[in-house]
Image (spheres, coloured by chain):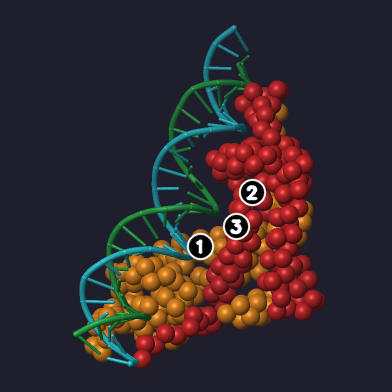
Chain colours: A orange, B red, C cyan, D green
Amino acid sequence: METSGAPQRLRGTTSWLLGQATTHAARLVSEALGAVGARRYHYSLLAALDEFGPASQADLGRRGGLDRSDVVATVNELADKGFVERRPDPGDKRRNIVTVTPSGVAHLRHLDRVLGQAQESLLAPLSAAEGEELVRVLNVVLEHQG
Amino acid sequence: METSGAPQRLRGTTSWLLGQATTHAARLVSEALGAVGARRYHYSLLAALDEFGPASQADLGRRGGLDRSDVVATVNELADKGFVERRPDPGDKRRNIVTVTPSGVAHLRHLDRVLGQAQESLLAPLSAAEGEELVRVLNVVLEHQG
DNA sequence: ACCCACTCGTTGGCAATGCCAACGATCAGT
DNA sequence: ACTGATCGTTGGCATTGCCAACGAGTGGGT
């Protein structure tokens, strides 16, 4: 008989918990976004624009933790789809000012819903209270790192 | 004045929580392992061997969720460092049997400590009870996915 | 004994991710 | 005017996680 064991999860030490959890969650997020033709950078950029308003590309990178070069590519893609507009800053010829279009805001809301569903499916095995506690605790962790 | 704002964290919707958290945790894990010359696959493979004993490469892949091709490369690297041994299976000429060496086990213990420190630094902003609860809840989530 | 379907290890490739270096243009402070 | 910094942009690199294909080998069915 061909011993074809089903995929198993390593339990051993708790040290690998982070590795397992991040891999799983990252796949969830990427799949959810990919299903609607988006990627992490798309959401990062749209969310930054939605929350803080129009900005130069360099500022966008700082807001979302993206490299300047990746901002270029992402703005290109989002502009092609009509989700953002890029125009030169009249007051500083080095800069472009990037703005969200209404269509871009709608797309962001869509991505929000998609990500919300991904989060729900991740928290599915937990009680409502556990899920809320997990979200709260993760926010604490993220706030503490800056 | 050059407006050089410090990097900020997006808060907006809670939907992006997963994206933020996974990115942060993944970087922590990769940096911790990279500091001692290891990568995620190395730990996955060593841990699988340590927990379930010697196995063929295909089985190793299934145990740790690695692709067969990645198992080849990882076993190559680990074998070069003397952490595992690869020899043909006498009972099935298609297979290799991979075994951990004592040196490999020692290395795994080292990686365990390193990952434990990374986890501690991540949980630093939490109380002991919150940290344990987070670990417990994450285990529930991982068990539920298979 | 002969197929057939499957598994094995291996090679090679692909796309996404996250970085870094360098360039010319522009700006701010002196 | 000179100097140093910032801007957008291009191009590159290493890692990560996958998938396809190959030749060699195995097991079941007939």
Residue type at the position of mark 3: Gly
Residue type at the position of mark 1: Ser
Q: Nearer the viewer, mark 2 or mark 3?
A: 3
Give percent across and percent down for residue B122: 67, 71
Question: Residue A58's image quarter?
Answer: bottom left
Q: Which of marks 1 and 2 is in front?
A: 2
The residue that label 3 is drawn on is: B34
Residue type at the position of mark 2: His
Give percent across and percent down for residue B50: 76, 45
The residue that label 2 is drawn on is: B42
Q: Which chain carries label 2?
A: B
Closer to the chain start, of discs 2 and 3, is 3
**Disc 1 to disc 2, C-alpha distance:** 24 Å
Residue nearer the viewer, B77 or A108: B77
Q: Which residue is drawn at 47% across and 76% down?
A: A64
Counting labels gives 3
Give percent across and percent down for residue B13: 53, 81
Is C21 left, or right, of A18 in this rendering? left
Q: Which residue is drawn at 62% across and 59% down?
A: B35
Question: Residue B11's image quarter?
Answer: bottom right
For numbered disc 1, what is the local secondary structure? helix
Query: Residue A30 bears which disc, if any?
Result: 1
For numbered disc 3, what is the local secondary structure? helix
